[in-house]
Image (cartoon, rainbow, N blue to C red):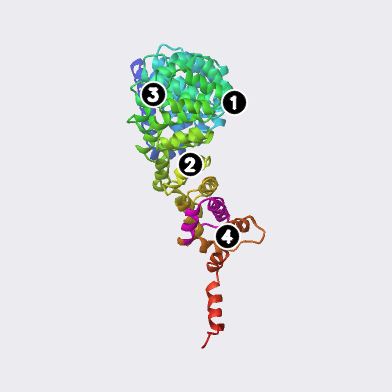
Amino acid sequence: MSQRQVLQVFEQYQKARTQFVQMVAELATRPQNIETLQNAGVMALLRPLLLDVVPTIQQTAALALGRLANYNDDLAEAVVKGDILPQLVYSLAEQNRFYKKAAAFVLRAVGKHSPQLAQAIVDCGALDTLVICLEDFDPGVKEAAAWALGYIARHNAELSQAVVDAGAVPLLVLCIQEPEIALKRIAVSALSDIAKHSPELAQTVVDAGVIAHLAQMILNPDAKLKRQVLSALSQIAKHSVDLAEMVVEAEIFPVVLTCLKDKDEYVKKNASTLIREIAKHTPELSQLIVNAGGVAAVIDCIGSCKGNIRLPGIMLLGYVAAHSENLAMAVIISKGVPQLSLCLSEEPEDHIKAAAAWALGHIGRHTPEHARAVAVTNTLPVLLSLYMSTESSEDLQVKSKKAIKNILQKCTYLPALEPFLYDAPPNILKHVVGQFSKVLPHDSKARRLFVTSGGLKKVQEIKAEPGSLLQEYINSINNCYPEEIVRYYSPGYSETLLQRVDSYQPLTN
């Protein structure tokens, strides 16, 4: 065989390898091909190609592996069991930028599925190499490394701590200051995934000086970056009063309120979530949000969107109202109650209805004035029907019942209470009768109306256990009226009258 023929054989072999990895990488982009590739043992065929002498074959083999591992945890598991990770980690440090990006993609694709698979990446020493890649001159390599680190950190506090211990945080903070938007997004997302697990991890991120940089990016025109920035600030603020105060001190108000009017729905949602995570901690932080116009802005935001986008805003109103009478009144003045009532009636999802019921309960539980503000929107019958409905989730039933009790125990607005005499189950009815027993002794107009509307008659029909709290309430109501009026409206009184007619002997001349 001549030298030329030998070279041709090698050229054909290289061409075949190139075609093979390119075809596999292409086939792996379509879900319908994955099972066939897996059954054909493609993992074992790709592994030696990671060590190929031709760089493009190495890179394409890594890309194909990444696409397969990204598809499901079985294939990711096969990458781990095939002893492919050590080779990737070694090459990540040695090869060119194209290979580095492909190798980091495989690590991210494996690590995303479960804590166990992410731990396998940590165990093979990948973190140190990924952190070195955060200092690479190529933004694409930095981005790929940040993405892999974020996917490892997001699972739990232990994996997050491993990422921190590898020295990733200061370099990720440098990455968010780079000009490339894609790199900023991924670096912010990775910092968010680290901060979310515990106050200690959040403090580590804060100590690296991240809050000031994030605060400056709130008004960045890129919607995806804004989403990530708002989410990262939420993950920091949620843990403690101190961390929430540090976020507020970065002067995010009133700037963050403009995000509540953003055309991107998830920017709205994440802005509401951030404000909620700050408000929940203390009355002082809630008052700061009220003073900045935050409550009114969130109520407008709830009115402009639907579904899960509304949820953090609804919860924010509940947290603010729960802190104090004055803060609950701020929600009422800003017209929060009609908006929450609307959510309760029109949202199809039970968990959103449950949040609205919870918030309304916190608004109405403070004083009769607060309870009336909720009652006049005709919310109580809606809450009752949700509580009574067999189609409602258990959580919705529990929250509706709690809200009804909270509001009823303060409500002295009798027109809203009266329908409950006819529709409420016994455990709710006692609270309704209890409110009438408090109001009627001191209000002559209400006493007269209670008779003419049929309320007094209905109370006489209630069967209460002798000596029970409900019986005491009924006795208190009956004591507000002359005995003959009570007797007149008692069940069986008409029979008694008829019997008296039957036995009555008319006087004759």
- Which residue, given by chain and number where applicable, does mark 1 sit on? 158
- Which residue, given by chain and number where applicable, does mark 4 sit on? 478
Q: Amino acid at mark 3?
A: Leu
Please identify the quadrant where the N terminus is shown.
Answer: top left
Q: Amino acid at mark 4?
A: Asn
Q: Depth-wise, is mark 1 or mark 3 nearer the camera?
A: 3
Magenta segment range?
A: 424-451
- Which residue, given by chain and number where applicable, does mark 3 sit on? 225
Cα separation, mark 3 vs mark 2, equals: 43 Å
**Residue 389 visible in this rendered orientation of the protein:** no
Percent of width and height locating residue 455: 49, 60
Check residue 52 for magenta coloring.
no
Of labels 3 and 2, earlier in sequence is 3
Marks 4 and 3: in contact by CB < 8 Å?
Answer: no
Cα separation, mark 1 vs mark 3, equals: 27 Å
Q: Residue furthest front?
A: 509
